[in-house]
Amino acid sequence: MSFSDLSTPVSGIPDEPGPDQRWSTWPLTTPTQRGPEPRPAWVITASAAWDTELGVLKTGKEADVHLLERSIPGGEGVVLAAKRYRDPDHRDFHRSSQYTEGRRLRRSRDTRAVERGSTYGRQVQAGAWAAAEFEALSTLWMLGAPVPYPVQVHGTELLLEFIGDGRAAAPRLAEVRVGSAELSALFDQVRSVLLLLADHGWAHGDLSPYNLLVHDERIVVIDLPQLVDVVSNPSGFELLERDCRVTAEWFARRGLAVDARALTDEVFACLG
Ligand SMILES: Nc1ncnc2c1ncn2[C@@H]1O[C@H](COP(=O)(O)OP(=O)(O)OP(=O)(O)O)[C@@H](O)[C@H]1O
Ligand SMILES: [Mg+2]
């Protein structure tokens, strides 16, 4: 064997991540930036793992969702959704401060940077949205709500359970064409989510058929950076009413006998 042969891995697997790859960012996260226990068996925590970019899933108003595969070189891999928040300069839409009322940044240095609008401050703000969504998803997942499992948050990037088959994402509710029995079953699931949230005093804050995925006939709720505390948020009641109305009206337009007022009343009666 010549000396140069020693640098070529016997397995044929390269030693370093290639283009569109990076080392897994899992080891860079602290325990509070990792998803809740019990952790699903498919979560890869090995520090020898790599993340491979598989492309953009969807560019949104505030974040872009990319497809990522985390795998142990030569071994198993899992497809994840990587939601990357943009700094406020690169957003098409600013969620109004009605959502952030009451949110405090931990470090006063960060608060000042956000107020000054420095580059660092804008990064902090994008990171705050990612952290807020991670926290909301973790809480809801632990309550058994149908949300993607939040794998980790690192800076402005959130890694989530990918809802779909293979590399094909599950459709949004707005895109599915189903019969009335199935539509009715989907409505029941959305209603249960609204009741579960209200029971804890929360509203989604941006619920619509675009933030609900349908996978194997199950509803999965996404896009939760603004989970609203209905009582403490000055716009809480308004946002909860809108979540109920937008959802009920969509199902009603599809021909289901649901009444927005009745749903709203039922959900408000459940407010914990
Ligand atoms: N965990 C996931 N699994 C599969 N697809 C996902 C997942 N999370 C997000 N998506 C896809 O990415 C899209 C955007 O995600 P999300 O709504 O969270 O971000 P957003 O920036 O608020 O987007 P928008 O501005 O379109 O509401 C979703 O509509 C969905 O198609
Ligand atoms: Mg969305």
Image: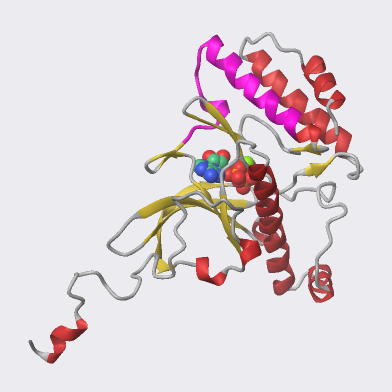
User: Of all residues shown, which one is farthest toward the bottom?
Assistant: 3
Main SS of residues in magenta: helix
Please tell me whether residue 74 is drawn above or below residue 65 in the rendered image: below
Number of marks present in the image shown:
0
At which x and y percent is residue 268? Answer: 85, 26
Residue 224 visible in image: yes
Determine which quarter of the picture holds residue 154.
Answer: bottom right
Query: Residue at coordinates 59% horizontally, 21% vertically from top-left?
Result: 186
User: Which residues are the magenta region?
Assistant: 170-196
Q: How is the image coloured?
A: secondary structure
Please tell me whether residue 73 is drawn above or below residue 160 in the rendered image: below
Q: Nearer the viewer, residue 111 or 184?
A: 184
User: Of all residues shown, which one is farthest toward the left?
Assistant: 1
Q: Is residue 53 left or right of residue 192?
A: left
In magenta segment, residue 32? no
At which x and y percent is residue 133? Answer: 68, 51
Query: Residue at coordinates 84% horizontally, 68% vertically from top-left?
Result: 115
Please tell me whether residue 243 is drawn above or below residue 94 in the rendered image: above
At which x and y percent is residue 78? Answer: 40, 52
Check the picture and name the quadrant holding the N terminus: bottom left
